[in-house]
Image (tube, rainbow, N blue to C red):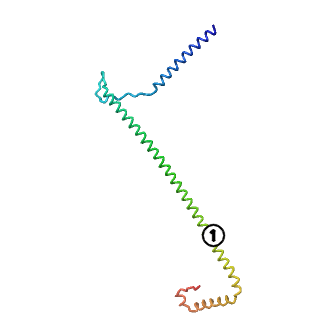
Amino acid sequence: MDIHHLSVQKELLKHENEGLKEALQQKQKHKKKSKALDLQQRQEYHGGTVCWSPCKFREAQAREAIRERDEMEERLQKAQAKKQRKEAQLQRQVELEEKRVERQRLKEMREVEQAEKAAERARKVEAQHQKKAIQQPQKRKQPALQAISSSNKRQKRAGAAHAGVEAQDEPSVKIG
């Protein structure tokens, strides 16, 4: 009895399973949502039986097709506008990146130029120091010449002081 009971139960479950599969297939077939056509164009309908002619049915289908086409065009326009905005944003980012790179390049060029100018100034200062270093030993060799020129300067200053008031009225110009 146990085996007979199990086999009957198995057959019942098998039959139930097949019925559920069929129901699922039927449901999937009718998954597409259908929309009711807008057959009624006039607002004068007050109830009662309405008969639709094939011509009215075709007109309603044409209106539905036009509405769907308009919706599709609107979606396409929105998608294109979104794509254009994204492309414009990418273009702006590329331009900003190019400007940033250009600013960086100019900054580096200025830094190199400043470094070259600083090096040139340092070379000039060094050349002046070397020139002074060369001239100092020569000055030591000519002390008599320096004494003469310094005594001339003292005399010139003394002569201007003896002129008195005239020298004070006129501004003195230092000749180097």
Q: Is residue 150 above or below residue 133?
A: below
Q: Position of residue 58 (x, y in %)?
A: 33, 29
84 or 42, nearer to the observer: 84
Residue found at the very far left of the displayed protein: 44
Check disc 1 and report the residue beneath it.
Answer: 119
Give the left or right position of residue 32, taking residue 133 as reference: left
97 or 132, nearer to the observer: 97
Quadrant (top left, top right, bottom left, bottom right) of the N terminus: top right
Three-letter amino acid code at the position of disc 1: Ala
Q: Is residue 43 above or below residue 97?
A: above
Q: Is residue 173 above or below residue 57?
A: below
- Which image quarter: residue 15? top right
Q: Position of residue 111 (x, y in %)?
A: 59, 64
Q: Residues within 10 Å of mark 1 (few under 14, many from 20)?
A: few
Residue found at the very far top of the displayed protein: 1
- Which image quarter: residue 117? bottom right
Q: Residue at x 45, y 42 (%)?
A: 79
129 or 175, nearer to the observer: 129
Quadrant (top left, top right, bottom left, bottom right) of the C terminus: bottom right
Secondary structure beneath disc 1? Answer: helix
